[in-house]
Image (cartoon, rainbow, N blue to C red):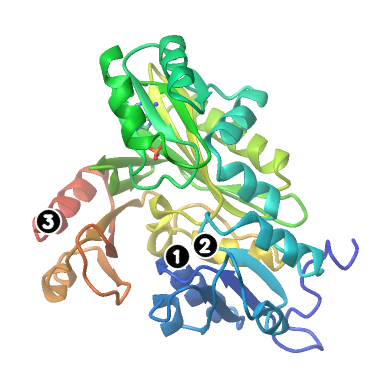
Amino acid sequence: MGAEQSGVRAYAGAMGRVRLGILGGGQLGRMLALAAHELGVQTRCWDQREDAVAGHVGGLHVDDFERPARLDAFLRGVDVVTTEWENVPVALLEEIERRGVPVRPGSLALRVAQDRVLEKNLARSLGIPTPAFVAARTLGELEGAVREVGLPCVVKTRRFGYDGKGQVVVRKAEEVAACWGALGATAGGLIAEGFVPFARELSIIAARGVDGQTRFYPLVCNEHAGGILRVSTSPAEGVSEGVRARAEEYAGGVLGALEYVGVLAIELFEVGGELVFNEIAPRVHNSGHWTIDASATSQFENHVRAVLGLPLGDAGMVAPGVHAGMVNLIGSMPDARQVLRIAGAKLHDYAKEARAGRKLGHVNVLAGSRGELMERIGQVRGLLR
Ligand code: AMP
């Protein structure tokens, strides 16, 4: 194994402490930094805002991503670079790679995950079922795309969509022009996708090390409202061995094709007992936050381990029979004392300024049965406005 393969030469070695650079400094960077510091790894998060909450935990580097003024200074302070924000410009990742600093996952993974057409093409090439989809760059093309995928359909911007932003459900042909009016001006074009009448939304969180070893967390069931993830539970109820194995096969295929290093999430629709690909998140994921308290190794620790070239940890539950959940705290925080009174509840507060629609924290919930889990999650939800 060469120097690049073996990862970070200096890990706990003669050259001193490893320093992890993280592009993005939101709550994901903050939780990555918390996990890294437990391993004695220093972190430096690069964010465009001075009040980025990862800065409370480790070093913070403030600079523009598109036109960085202090790239050299950032790179002098880190040994390996990872990302917590999937919209970091690919050109920046490529520049860092050119300068010989390992970027994990690499620019290819981000390039694919930033474009809904590229990621669905990848899924299709790996034999993973996707909704029907057609790309469109003009109103005429969108009309053709909608005809091809059929109604109802979901029209999305190819790039920069998140939390349900940048997408419109089209139910009638007459709505296509209004949809073009709402989304058509977006650089990068649109994608029309067949509407999937899913029974539920699942995700799989997976990790791949520098040496290609993989780990898969139990499948997660996700409940969204207004395009934003509200509640995740794991293991997802009533998942057959076959469905679980298929999800792992799909995730393993994506990880391998992208030569991926780190944690990745794949969002899936379950429909008629089958799994349909929705999208990839090339990073630790909101639907994996419960792993902090419920898994033998959290998604954050496994991501840090992976990008530093360390052995991955067990992705199983912390104990047999544990059921885990996560409730997002969005827009305002509940009274901490009331949360902490709930049995099995663990509060994670990102110390962010409250703003409508903003993810401010989450509550992880552990229980000994599915019934007990849902009851405790109900208690947490009862505290939310
Ligand atoms: P996305 O940003 O692609 O994850 O979409 C946000 C949410 O919109 C998903 O979590 C689904 O609830 C819904 N959605 C997205 N694409 C589709 C689709 N093709 N069919 C049905 N629902 C969809």
Specify whether 247 is left or right of 109: left
CB under 8 Å between callouts 1 and 3? no
Rendered position, 385 above or below 232: below
The percent position of residue 177, horizontal first and vertical second, equals 32, 23
Q: Residues within 10 Å of mark 3 (few under 14, many from 20)?
A: some
Rendered position, 375 above or below 180: below
Report which quarter residue 5 is drawn in: bottom right
User: Any atom of ligand 1 within 8 Å of the CB at mark 1?
Assistant: no
Report which quarter residue 37 is drawn in: bottom right
Badge 1 or badge 3: first in the primary sequence: 1
> As shown in the figure, which amino acid type bears the numbered disc 3?
Gln
Tell me the tag on residue 84: 2
CB under 8 Å between callouts 2 and 1? yes
Residue at numbered disc 1: 28
**As rendered, which of 367 and 159 lies closer to the eye?**
159
Q: Residue at x 43, y 23 (%)?
A: 139
> As shown in the figure, which amino acid type bears the numbered disc 1?
Leu
Rendered position, 319 above or below 24: above
The percent position of residue 179, horizontal first and vertical second, equals 32, 28
Residue at numbered disc 3: 379
